[in-house]
Image: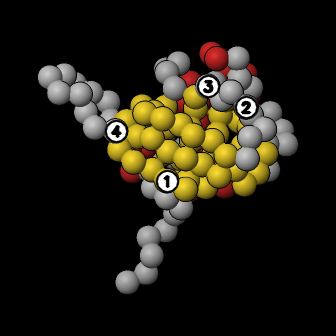
């Protein structure tokens, strides 16, 4: 049986050191399939502008991923995961809220529109799954 193909995700959160060789993201909220993140998956790291970040800063590979147990007694809870990422590239061009804001037509199926919708429609920090075409688009920034 062949090994499962690596998937691609975006992590948008506060990043204290954008030049680090690796990142640890504890108990991150997940949306749009983000809860399926696993070791070996590709991650594009966006330093959240609401925390003073600059948008896309790095590409990496997940080295560990684990689900965070749900809190007992709470009816509705967003799945959370903790991940560690080894940096494999640093963004050479800017890509953030300013560059993605014009892409709001959800029917156009452009990678920029997917990123704008999944990352910036809500200001919360999160891990989201992305389409292969969007991962290919993001590769152009490295």
Dot 4, how many residues are within 10 Å of its Cα: few (below 14), some (14-19), or many (20+)?
some
Between label 3 and label 4, give the one nearer the viewer: 4
Q: Quadrant of the N terminus?
A: bottom left
Between label 3 and label 2, give the one nearer the viewer: 2
Secondary structure under the numbered disc 2 in the rendered image: loop
Circles 4 and 2, Cβ within 8 Å, touching? The answer is: no
**Is 132 situated left or right of 82 in this image?**
right
Circles 4 and 1, Cβ within 8 Å, touching? The answer is: no
Q: To which residue does mark 1 refer?
A: 64
Secondary structure under the numbered disc 3 in the rendered image: loop
Q: To which residue does mark 2 refer?
A: 17
**Marks 4 and 2, the one that precedes in the sequence:** 2
- Residue toward you, 17 or 1: 17
**Marks 2 and 1, the one that precedes in the sequence:** 2
- In the rendered image, the residue lying farthest to the bottom is 1
> Residue 119 placed where, x, y %?
55, 30
Mark 3 and mark 4: span between their CA atoms?
A: 19 Å
Circles 3 and 2, Cβ within 8 Å, touching? The answer is: no
Mark 4 and mark 2: span between their CA atoms?
A: 24 Å
Question: Is 119 situated above or below 114?
Answer: above
Q: To which residue does mark 3 refer?
A: 14
Dot 1, how many residues are within 10 Å of its Cα: few (below 14), some (14-19), or many (20+)?
some
Circles 3 and 4, Cβ within 8 Å, touching? The answer is: no
> Residue 142 placed where, x, y %?
79, 50
Circles 1 and 3, Cβ within 8 Å, touching? The answer is: no
**Is 140 situated left or right of 110 in this image?**
right
The residue that appears at 67% across and 46% down in the rendered structure is 22
- Residue toward you, 90 or 130: 90
**Is 29 situated left or right of 71 in this image?**
right
Q: To which residue does mark 4 refer?
A: 68
Mark 4 and mark 1: span between their CA atoms?
A: 13 Å
Mark 1 and mark 3: span between their CA atoms?
A: 19 Å
């Amino acid at each position: 049986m062949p090994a499962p193909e690596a998937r691609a995700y975006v992590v948008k959160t506060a990043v204290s050191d954008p030049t680090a060789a690796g990142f640890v993201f504890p108990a991150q909220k997940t949306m749009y399939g983000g809860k399926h993140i696993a070791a070996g998956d590709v991650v594009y790291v966006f330093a959240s502008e609401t925390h003073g970040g600059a948008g896309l800063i790095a590409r990496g590979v997940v080295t560990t991923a684990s689900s965070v147990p749900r809190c007992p007694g709470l009816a509705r809870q967003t799945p959370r995961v903790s991940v560690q990422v080894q940096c494999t590239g640093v963004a050479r061009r800017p890509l953030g809220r300013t560059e993605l804001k014009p892409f709001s037509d959800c029917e156009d199926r452009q990678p920029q529109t997917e990123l704008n919708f999944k990352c910036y429609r809500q200001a919360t920090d999160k891990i989201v799954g992305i389409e292969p075409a969007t991962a290919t688009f993001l590769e152009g920034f490295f």
